[in-house]
Amino acid sequence: MSHDTGGEGTKRDDTNIEMKVIVAENKSLLTKVRVLEEAVDEVSTALDKTCAILRIQTTSFMLSSQTAHTLTVEQVHKDDQQSRTEHEQLQQQQQELQQQLLLLQQTLQAEQLKSKLLSAEAAALREGKEGEGRLE
């Protein structure tokens, strides 16, 4: 009794190729996640540095003489407005990066689940093939 195993072999090859593609996609997503995590850290560090610089500038201005005080207060108001604007922009950028990171993490989880399902399917195919061999 001869069986045509060409279709099963091709399906197994297709499954192996799909698994390799998924593994490559997972690695790519992990790399993207790491890049986004680093970008979030950089934005957070920049935000901390900006706030620290503004605190130092504010303290310095407040210690200046009374004559310079009037000019300093005006400059502080300008700097404060600019820092608020920068702070809002950095917070928005950080939120966008966190959303991208979350999306990539969700995509990675979905791809990992898909990979597990394909592995289970491949195992079922192997078991089915072994079962056919025992019946012969």
Image (tube, rainbow, N blue to C red):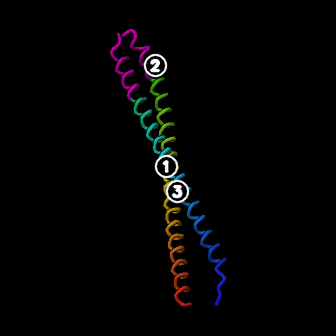
Q: Amino acid at mark 1?
A: Val
Q: Which residue was labeled with disc 2?
A: 75
Closer-to-camera residue (4/128): 4
Q: Amino acid at mark 2?
A: Gln
Question: Quick one: label 1 or label 3, which is nearer the N terminus?
Answer: 3
Label 3, label 2: how many angstroms apart (C-alpha)? 50 Å
Question: Quick one: label 3 or label 2, which is nearer the N terminus?
Answer: 3
Identify the mark at residue 99; answer none if there is no mark: none
Secondary structure under tag 2 reads: helix
Locate residue 127, reporting x and y percent: 51, 80
Locate residue 135, reporting x and y percent: 54, 90
Residue displayed at 44% across by 33% down = 46
Q: Amino acid at mark 3?
A: Asn
The span shown in magenta is 52-76
Above or below, 122 against 53 in this view is: below
Q: Does the magenta portion include 60?
A: yes
Q: Which residue was labeled with disc 3?
A: 26
Identify the mark at residue 33; answer none if there is no mark: 1
In the rendered structure, the answer to whether residue 49 lies left or right of residue 11 reads left
